[in-house]
Amino acid sequence: MLGQSNGNQASYLMYWALPSTVLAGLVGAVLALKDGKFAIPATLPWSYSFRTDTTTNNNNNNSLEKPLLVPGLQNLENNCFLNVVLQALASCFCFQSFLHRVISECGTRDLDESMPLALSLASLLQELGSVCEEKVTLSPRKVMLTMAHYIPNFNLTNQQDAAEAFLHLLCSLREEIGGCYAPKMSSLADIFASNNRILTRIHRDWQSEHERWHQLYLGPFDGILSSSLTCQSCSSQV
């Protein structure tokens, strides 16, 4: 009986000590975490589910963001060669600043009549450089109509050489802007009636205007654009 009583008492003490041991272990683990002496395994189940939820949230956020697009140009019959030139000029910031500087130099006159090509070209290039969230198609019709005034024999609606179209565009701009820098003179009667001092002053003003125009024009494109043809039979060049 005594041995059985001692066994029951030992079992009772063991069962009573088990919760105390577990509780002490939990307290020790908490203290170890607090002191930074215990590292959490990187493969805990809840850490994986957390990364999965984060990735899902990022995908949802990315799906809500719309991509930014740049406008395109409408093909009017077969003017893709000109659209290539216009899109290239839209990426040339020095040419756009040149256009705005020349327009501002011409003052506050009726620019719609005196510089229609420069105005329409500057406006179109500015729109081509903007970004938007939806697809936008711009029309180069206004630029083509103003160019046709200077180059009536060059059909802009048929397939042409892009380099030749670029040269015609620059020559048309030069002709248009050159009128803005023309010297302001009176009638022939006033010129012949004036003395040499006034004529010299007018000539000096003209040189000043011409030099300013020459400096502005050669800013973005200082060079020579040429083309050559080679005969495949005799190899002669033109």
Image: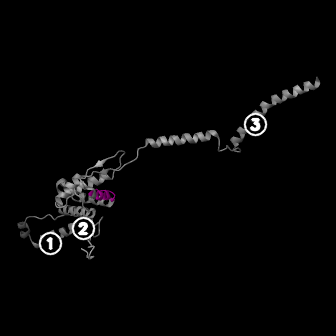
Q: Residue at coordinates 26% horizontally, 55% vertically from top-left?
A: 122
Between disc 3 and disc 1, the foreground one is 3
**Percent from the top left, x then y, of residue 109?**
18, 55
Query: In terms of secondary structure, where does tag 3 sit?
Result: helix
**How far is mark 3 from mark 1, CA to CA?**
107 Å
Residue 108 appears in the picture as rendered: no
Q: Which residues are magenta?
A: 82-92
**Which circle's residue, 3 or 2, is located before the other in the chain?**
3
Give the residue at mark 2. Answer: 214
Q: Is residue 13 left or right of residue 188?
A: right
At label 1, counting other C-alpha atoms closer than 10 Å, the crowd grade (few under 14, some 14-19, many 20 or more) is few
**Percent from the top left, x then y, of residue 57?**
51, 40
The answer to whether marks 3 and 1 mark residues whose Cβ atoms lie closer than 8 Å is: no
Give the residue at mark 1. Answer: 200
**How far is mark 2 from mark 1, CA to CA?**
21 Å
175 vs 198, nearest the viewer: 175
Amino acid type, mark 1: Thr
The quadrant of the rendering that contains the N terminus is: top right
Query: In terms of secondary structure, where does tag 2 sit?
Result: helix
75 vs 144, nearest the viewer: 75
Figure check: 190 above or below 56: below
The quadrant of the rendering that contains the C terminus is: bottom left
Give the residue at mark 3. Answer: 25
Amino acid type, mark 3: Gly
